[in-house]
């Protein structure tokens, strides 16, 4: 990426800057999506998201999702590569401190960690106030935040739900079957510029606030 397009590289004093508060001010969710592009080609849905939900200390790639964003298969007039989300179903997480966010960027940089050296491979920038804002304001498709030590709070889904199949290609999963894989989580989405929540009893979507999503709790395992 052309460094002239990036914000200032010398950050100001950030003692008062809270990334968690920034995300709430922007009403942006952090979502790790189940995608076809993965460093673990043999990890299929729903095990990929179940494993991601249980990780501790391991950074993963997330997209910032807002109420006006669209999924890769939601609108037939939009190329999946141009969507704001890297997949159609994923886990929503919360963070407790700035240390949870490793890097941010306005593009899907395919960031990963070298398991031998612990160094980060490709894209992403330190999460200064300017770069956090730039990662959202400067995105043209999906962006990437590299995040660790997060707390899963729910599932986010755009219909139709397509995931990696056994053959390695895309395969559609029926909505109710996909949601049944995560009985402990509430299910959220976005449509028409607002967040919505799925009611498992009525099978309907209802408007919901950003704060309601962020205050969601995980149900105890039965």
Image: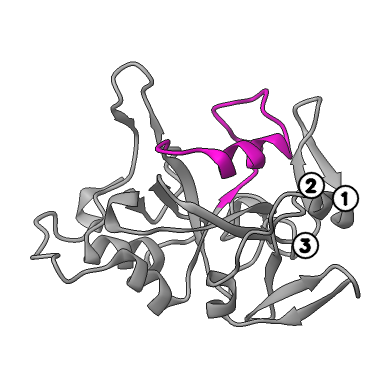
* Residue 135 position by quadrant: bottom left
Q: CA distance from mark 2 to mark 1?
A: 7 Å
Q: Report the residue marked by disc 1.
A: 177
- Quarter of the picture containing the N terminus is top left
Q: Which residue is mark 3?
A: 76
User: Measuring 24% from the left and 56% from the top, which residue is drawn there?
Assistant: 6
Q: Position of residue 221 (x, y in %)?
A: 72, 49
Q: Is residue 52 magenta?
A: yes
- Farthest-out residue, top: 116
The region drawn magenta spans 32-58
Is 171 located above or below residue 86 in the figure? above
User: Which residue: 66% across, 60% down?
Assistant: 156
Q: Is residue 189 left or right of residue 149?
A: right
Q: Quadrant of residue 37?
A: top right
Query: CA–CA distance between discs 3 and 2?
Result: 27 Å
Please state if 77 lies on the left or on the right of 180 as rendered.
Answer: left
Residue of label 2: 181
Residue in view at x 70 percent, y 76 percent: 196
* Residue 146 appears in the figure: yes
Say what secondary structure mark 3 lies in.
loop
Question: Dot 2, how many residues are within 10 Å of its Cα: few (below 14), some (14-19), or many (20+)?
Answer: some
Crowding near pointer 1: few (<14 within 10 Å), some, many (20+)?
few
Please state the horizontal and vertical placement of residue 94, each as a whole percent of the image: 47, 60
Mark 3 Cα within 10 Å, few/some/many (few <14, many 20+)?
few
Q: How many marks?
A: 3
Disc nearest the viewer among 1 and 3 = 1
Q: Is residue 44 a member of the stretch shown in magenta?
A: yes
Q: Secondary structure at mark 1?
A: helix
Magenta-colored segment: predominant secondary structure? loop
């Amino acid at each position: 990426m052309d460094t002239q397009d990036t914000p200032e590289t010398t950050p100001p004093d950030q003692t008062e800057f809270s990334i968690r508060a920034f995300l709430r001010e922007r009403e942006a969710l952090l979502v790790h999506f189940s995608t076809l592009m993965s460093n673990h080609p043999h990890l299929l849905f729903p095990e990929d998201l179940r494993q991601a939900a249980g990780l501790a200390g391991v950074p993963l790639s997330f997209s910032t999702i807002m109420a006006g964003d669209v999924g890769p298969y939601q609108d037939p007039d939009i190329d999946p590569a141009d969507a704001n989300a890297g997949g159609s179903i994923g886990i929503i997480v919360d963070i407790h401190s700035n240390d949870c966010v490793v890097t941010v960027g306005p593009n899907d940089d395919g960031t990963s960690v070298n398991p031998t050296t612990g160094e980060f491979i490709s894209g992403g920038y330190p999460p200064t106030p300017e770069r956090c804002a730039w990662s959202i304001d400067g995105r043209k498709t999906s962006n990437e935040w590299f995040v660790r030590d997060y707390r899963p709070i729910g599932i986010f889904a755009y219909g139709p739900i397509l995931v990696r199949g056994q053959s390695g290609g895309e395969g559609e999963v029926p909505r109710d079957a996909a949601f049944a894989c995560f009985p402990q989580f509430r299910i959220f989405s976005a449509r028409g510029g607002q967040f919505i929540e799925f009611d498992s009893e009525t099978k309907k979507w209802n408007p919901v606030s950003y704060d309601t999503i962020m205050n969601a709790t995980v149900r105890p395992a039965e």
